[in-house]
Amino acid sequence: MRTRRRGNELESAVYESAMAELAATGYAGFTMDGVAARARCGKAVLYRRWPGKRELLLAALRAYIPPLPAARRDRSARQNLLAGLSSLADVLAGKTAYPALFVVVQLFHDAEMRALYAESIVAQRTKVLDEIIAAGVSSGEIAPSAVTAFTTRTGPALIVQRILLTGTVPTRSELEQIVDTLIGRPGHPVGDR
């Protein structure tokens, strides 16, 4: 039975249905028909807003991914980076409404979807981590010589590696070790060795 919805109500129902469809069928089985059936709307309703499954799924993913915490002035660079990486670990582990890493990696078999995901999801999160690092450099807590093109990518890469290889997220202690590796321990910055 179809329900007549419009605007934000329809969009929310479609996004929720897209997440449920992705979780149930994986990316290979994800279809506009499946989303329409779950959302109890016509497929034409979907195509009026999104040209295809990639665009619909990407919009749903953007709607469901929680933002990374931005750098706060009342916290040290280390605390800000730890908060950002902890939030990222929770998202990748499936501790939020966002699909877990094991579901998301299925998207990467589609080269176009992989590029879209990198551009609109990964790049935005990397930007937040870059801003946290830049704020730490500005405050003098992070040595400029410690910052490389890989600084903000290394923490997420280690988290992803841990989840893929063990099925578990890094512990708080391990996240602290990642931060220490990236920017050094308090009083022992990486660039001053």
Image (spheres, helix red, strand yellow):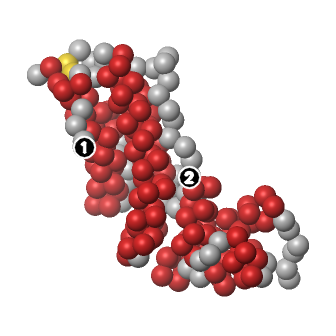
* Whether residue 82 can be seen here: no
Of residues 175 and 140, the one drawn nearer to the viewer in this rendering: 140
Q: Position of residue 135 (x, y in %)?
A: 39, 24
Q: Is residue 26 above or below residue 155?
A: below
| 35 left or right, relative to 3 | left
Location of residue 99 with respect to 123 vertically, above or below: below
Q: Would you call the spot at circle 2 few (<14 residues within 10 Å), some (14-19), or many (20 or more)?
A: some
**Nearer-N-terminus badge (2/1):** 2
SS assignment at label 2 = loop
Q: Nearer the viewer, mark 2 or mark 1?
A: 1
- Kindly state the secondary structure of the residue where label 1 is placed: loop
Q: Identify the residue shown where x is 65% and y is 72%.
A: 50
The outermost residue toward the right is 4
Check the image and report above or below for 178 versus 125: above
Residue corresponding to mark 1: 150
CA separation, marks 2 and 1? 23 Å
Residue type indicated by callout 1: Phe
Residue furthest toward the left? Answer: 193
Position above or below: 122 against 136: below
Q: Which residue is identified by label 2?
A: 65
Q: Amino acid at mark 2?
A: Ile
Residue at 24% across / 25% down in the picture?
Answer: 144
Where's residue 10, x and y in %?
A: 79, 65
Which quarter of the picture shows residue 49?
Answer: bottom right
- Which image quadrant is residue 130 in? top left
Of residues 41 and 149, which is closer to you in this image?
149
Q: Residue at x 85, y 68 (%)?
A: 5
Report the number of numbered marks.
Answer: 2
Could you say where residue 108 lies in the image, as x and y percent from the top left? 39, 70
Residue 106's x, y, as percent?
Answer: 42, 72
Which numbered disc covers residue 162?
none
Residue 86 position by quadrant: top left
